[in-house]
């Protein structure tokens, strides 16, 4: 084992298990015909993966910044490419989040997807494999294969089961993200030629020349900024979110957007630190533009999905703001916001999906005034909406507070403008909430939440309150990794 | 042992000359399938053969045997894909010509002397000139295609002979080994570089590299599906082999040759991909995709070392399978023998999920998306070109990948998200399903498990 990787204390290769369980489930589904069995198999696979990922979570040792549960096999020796897996404090939470979201996506598509159930469930499970693979890979090529392979099922989810403008949205999504990724590939090859290996930890903190770092940072950040998406690369997001089926939107919001910020933390900061310092002011400005611009665009939306999509742009702005302040508070806040946004925005998309199944409209006006006759629905909606604009007591408040503290510590104007963005967030979310609860007087007959919907909303609601009231267990998991990263960066800065 | 694959292929071709006297079409096709499979087994068995024949003009080594196995595998698959008895006339003669063409290519990859190269190349080309017009649906296009192919081919050969004349003038010998010994002192002058580039031109033609690409779209459109499948895959294998062999002549001083290759590669991939964007006919689209891929392939040649050459061999091998997969879908969808348009793909995923999947895997592979073989092959090319210091062409190729995804994705999009005009399900026979699964498996295998094959190719070059 290389020095950055600690042995796997469990008796079996748990990371491979988490990655490939969904793939195995997808292969099993290939053999099934009955639609209900397909749904049940997909759900069972998702739950099993979640259980294994929880085992991983609870055996994770938060006391070390090293990569844990290492697995290492030679793969393409001619190019020094290896199959290396490992998790640290940054990736472990995202893996659990992915494993949590996937079965919820299966559940929320139980009735909404009536056509081509088999292909749909296979796509969902393939997505899960690729996404967990991205967070576990410690080899650039392995990472890149998962990173790109993710595009295919996501593309199909939008292009086959999407809304009326699915052609446009899916194509734009694919081409936009691929455009970023090819530069990532070029940067990866450049790092290989500099290091002689595709190992990710081996490429960190090597003190490359500034010129080299400059270009590698640009190549990396095109890929990641498109994925986040940062302003001005965000235009694919509203289209893709609006046209995707509910499960697709949830995956996009909860996990795919995190890939970009994960990329910044995993690659940009440790591999090209000097260039990251150099570009940080630009990134901070872009983040603040995203926060304020995203907020104002939200104020003008009449489509619920579009509103939530643009709010994602604003929320992800907080994450990149936290990352590029280079303080420990900023990193912690960014990590927390990644999780919070994944849960809260994912939940809001689920809420839109639920009401869409009843009213067949995503327009705010068509879904207004539900307060009297859908009490449970509106209760959940209210919780997630207030969480979305970082109301104290909910999860986003903790994350945003961390980010704001670090932003003020670093630069007062940055903090000031970020606070304005937070206020705008309250304005558009409260406006949406007001409409949904009291917006119309007339009585319509819709069923309130059924058991299935209740089941997949409940864990998200618990998370919202838990992190909001007692975030310590979650921070403890990632603390050491972030402290280590911050210390390393500090050494270079001084 | 050393000549067994070639002798067998000769026997194969000649036996169909006699079979053309008979009348039973079905029997001929069955016989062709059986014989070609035997041929593949023989070629595989002879892959360890070594030796030099005809006073050193003909070298049987691991490099040539690897290509013979690839050629034989490709030819076997083409014969197995051949379904439409009514698409071409004169089936026995058709197989005879294809057999002779493959024979010529097999001899070509073993030739290390200029005259043998010319003769074997012409054996292969003349058979193809005869095959292009053999299409049942009599329209003008296949005749036009045949004439174009003949004239462009003749011009390419002429330019090659011109270059070879200079090579002979410099080396006083037609043996490549002698040329390699003498050429370095001329490489600093235009003479040496031009002689080499002219000699390469015939293979640029086979590979449909800019500026020898003009024939490809018309021939792909005009020839029958089976003929196009052959022309689009098998001769390109041999062309890649000879490009490696001839480009290595300049390995001592690659400067100017490399500059020319960079420009041709960049133009070829950009032109192929941009024109590919507006195509309506699937075969024409694949022709432009082939032009672009010829450009990608050139990146591996730039390094002029073993690693780059192995990348070229790997890529052309993947290219064989992903192209065959695409053409197989085209063949099965146009059962009447007419050309398939992109709109003709609509609703494919409902009519036949397996065909749609095969097309999707092949298209993603052509575009170079992991985890398919197209990505892995392209990645090796990128690394070797980058390592040799040609960053610009790597970036151009990367941007081209993004351009090309538009039309490859279009194939997938139409077959998955459009509703069919003809909603009737498409029934595939058992062996058709087997071939589809085979293509998918090979493309994914070459994407995820490249090490065995790559090591093999590295030993070969």
Image (spheres, coloured by chain):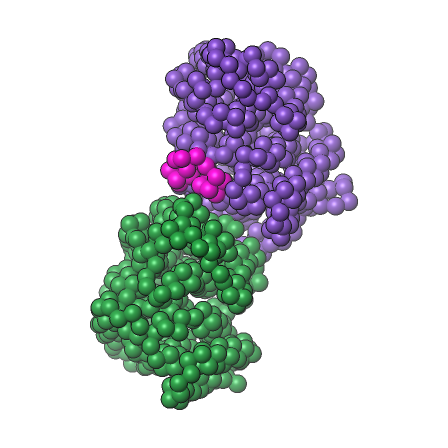
Chain colours: A purple, B green
Is residue B256 found left or right of B315 in the rendered image?
Answer: left
Q: Position of residue A438 (x, y in %)?
A: 50, 10
* Residue B232 in the image: above or below residue A132: below
Q: Which residues are magenta?
A: A156-173
Which secondary structure type mostly characterizes the magenta part of the structure?
helix
At horizontal 28% and vertical 61% (from top left) the residue drawn is B217
* Residue B83 in the image: above or below residue B20: above
Taking the magenta stretch, the answer to whether it contains residue A164 is: yes
* Residue B285 in the image: above or below residue B41: above
Please state which of residues A51 and B204 is positioned toward the viewer in this rendering. A51
Is residue B69 found left or right of B254 in the rendered image?
Answer: right
Q: Position of residue B285 (x, y in %)?
A: 33, 56
Please state which of residues A167 and A178 is positioned toward the viewer in this rendering. A167
Please state which of residues A138 and B427 is positioned toward the viewer in this rendering. B427
At horizontal 54% and vertical 77% (from top left) the residue drawn is B41
Displayed quadrant of residue A290: top left
At horizontal 46% and vertical 54% (from top left) the residue drawn is B351
Is residue B267 found left or right of B380 in the rendered image?
Answer: left
């Amino acid at each position: 084992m290389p020095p950055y990787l600690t042995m796997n204390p469990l008796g079996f290769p748990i990371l491979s298990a988490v990655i490939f369980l969904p793939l195995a489930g997808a292969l099993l589904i290939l053999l099934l015909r009955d639609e209900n069995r397909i749904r049940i198999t997909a759900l069972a696979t998702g739950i099993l993966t979640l259980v294994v990922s929880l085992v991983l979570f609870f055996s994770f040792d938060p006391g070390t910044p090293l990569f844990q549960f290492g697995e290492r096999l030679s793969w393409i020796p001619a190019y020094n490419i290896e199959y290396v897996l490992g998790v640290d404090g940054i990736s472990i939470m995202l893996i659990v989040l992915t494993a949590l979201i996937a079965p919820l996506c299966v559940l929320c598509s139980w009735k909404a997807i009536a056509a081509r159930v088999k292909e749909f469930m296979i796509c969902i499970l393939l997505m899960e494999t690729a996404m967990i693979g991205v967070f576990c890979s410690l080899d650039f090529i392995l990472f890149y294969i998962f990173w790109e392979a993710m595009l295919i099922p996501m593309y199909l989810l939008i292009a086959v089961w999407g809304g009326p403008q699915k052609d446009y949205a899916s194509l734009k999504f694919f081409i936009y993200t691929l455009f970023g990724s090819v530069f990532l590939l070029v940067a990866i090859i450049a790092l290989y030629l500099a290091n002689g290996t595709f190992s990710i930890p081996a490429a960190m903190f090597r003190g490359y020349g500034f010129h080299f770092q400059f270009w590698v940072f640009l190549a990396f950040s095109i890929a990641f900024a498109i994925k986040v998406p940062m302003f001005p690369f965000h235009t694919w997001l509203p289209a893709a979110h609006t046209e995707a089926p509910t499960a697709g939107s949830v995956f996009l919001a909860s996990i795919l957007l995190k890939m970009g910020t994960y990329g910044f933390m995993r690659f940009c900061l440790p591999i090209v630190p000097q260039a990251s310092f150099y570009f940080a002011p630009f990134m901070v400005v872009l983040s603040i533009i995203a926060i304020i611009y995203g907020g104002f665009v939200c104020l003008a939306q009449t489509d619920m999905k579009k509103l939530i999509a643009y709010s994602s742009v604003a929320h992800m702005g907080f994450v990149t703001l936290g990352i590029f302040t280079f303080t420990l508070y900023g990193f912690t806040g960014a990590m927390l916001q990644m999780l919070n946004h994944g849960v809260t925005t994912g939940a809001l998309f689920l809420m839109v999906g639920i009401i869409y199944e009843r009213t067949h409209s995503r327009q705010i006006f068509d879904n207004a005034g539900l307060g009297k006759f859908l009490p449970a629905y509106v209760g959940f909606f209210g919780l997630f909406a207030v969480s979305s604009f970082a109301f104290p007591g909910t999860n986003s408040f903790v994350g945003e507070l961390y980010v704001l503290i670090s932003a003020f510590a670093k630069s007062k104007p940055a903090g000031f403008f970020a606070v304005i963005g937070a206020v705008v967030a309250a304005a558009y979310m409260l406006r949406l909430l007001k409409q949904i609860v009291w917006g119309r007087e007339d009585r319509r007959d819709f069923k309130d939440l059924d058991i299935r919907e209740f089941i997949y909303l409940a864990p998200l609601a618990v998370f919202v309150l838990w992190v909001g009231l007692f975030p310590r267990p979650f921070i403890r998991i990632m603390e050491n990794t972030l402290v280590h990263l911050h210390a390393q960066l500090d050494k270079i800065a001084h | 042992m050393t000549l067994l694959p070639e002798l067998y292929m000769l026997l194969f071709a000649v036996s169909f000359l006699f079979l053309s006297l008979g009348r039973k079409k079905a029997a001929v096709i069955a016989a062709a399938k059986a014989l070609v499979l035997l041929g593949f087994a023989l070629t595989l068995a002879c892959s360890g053969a070594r030796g030099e024949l005809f006073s050193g003009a003909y070298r049987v080594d691991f490099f040539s045997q690897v290509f013979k196995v690839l050629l034989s595998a490709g030819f076997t698959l083409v014969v197995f894909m051949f379904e439409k008895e009514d698409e071409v006339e004169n089936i026995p003669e058709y197989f005879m010509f294809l057999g002779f063409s493959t024979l010529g290519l097999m001899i070509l990859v073993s030739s290390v002397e200029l005259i043998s190269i010319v003769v074997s190349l012409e054996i292969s080309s003349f058979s193809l000139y005869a095959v292009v017009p053999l299409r049942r649906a009599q329209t003008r296009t296949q005749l036009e295609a045949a004439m174009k192919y003949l004239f462009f081919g003749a011009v390419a050969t002429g330019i090659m002979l011109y270059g070879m004349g200079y090579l002979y003038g410099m080396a006083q010998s037609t043996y490549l080994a002698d040329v390699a010994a003498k050429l370095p002192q001329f490489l600093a002058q235009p003479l040496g570089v031009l002689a080499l580039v002219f000699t390469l031109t015939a293979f640029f033609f086979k590979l449909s590299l800019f500026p020898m690409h003009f024939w490809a779209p018309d021939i792909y459109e005009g020839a029958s599906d089976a003929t196009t499948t052959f022309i689009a895959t098998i001769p390109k294998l041999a062309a890649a082999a000879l490009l490696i062999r001839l480009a290595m002549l300049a390995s001592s001083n690659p400067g100017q040759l490399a500059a020319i290759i960079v420009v041709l590669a960049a133009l070829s991939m950009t032109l192929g991909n941009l024109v590919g964007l507006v195509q309506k006919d699937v075969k024409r689209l694949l022709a432009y995709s082939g032009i672009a891929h010829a450009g990608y392939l050139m990146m591996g040649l730039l390094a002029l070392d073993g690693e780059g050459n192995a990348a070229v061999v790997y890529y052309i091998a993947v290219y064989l399978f992903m192209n065959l997969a695409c053409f197989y879908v085209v063949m099965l969808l146009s059962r009447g023998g007419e050309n398939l348009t992109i709109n003709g793909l609509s609703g494919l995923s409902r009519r036949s999920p397996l065909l749609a999947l095969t097309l999707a895997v092949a298209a993603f592979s052509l575009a170079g998306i992991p985890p398919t073989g197209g990505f892995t092959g392209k990645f090796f090319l990128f690394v070797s070109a980058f390592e040799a210091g040609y960053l610009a062409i790597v970036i151009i190729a990367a941007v081209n990948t993004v351009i090309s995804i538009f039309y490859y994705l279009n194939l997938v999009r139409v077959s998955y998200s459009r509703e069919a005009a003809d909603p009737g399900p498409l029934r595939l026979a058992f062996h058709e399903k087997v071939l589809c699964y085979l293509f998918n498996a090979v493309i994914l295998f070459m994407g995820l498990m490249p090490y065995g094959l790559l090591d093999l190719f590295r030993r070969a070059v």
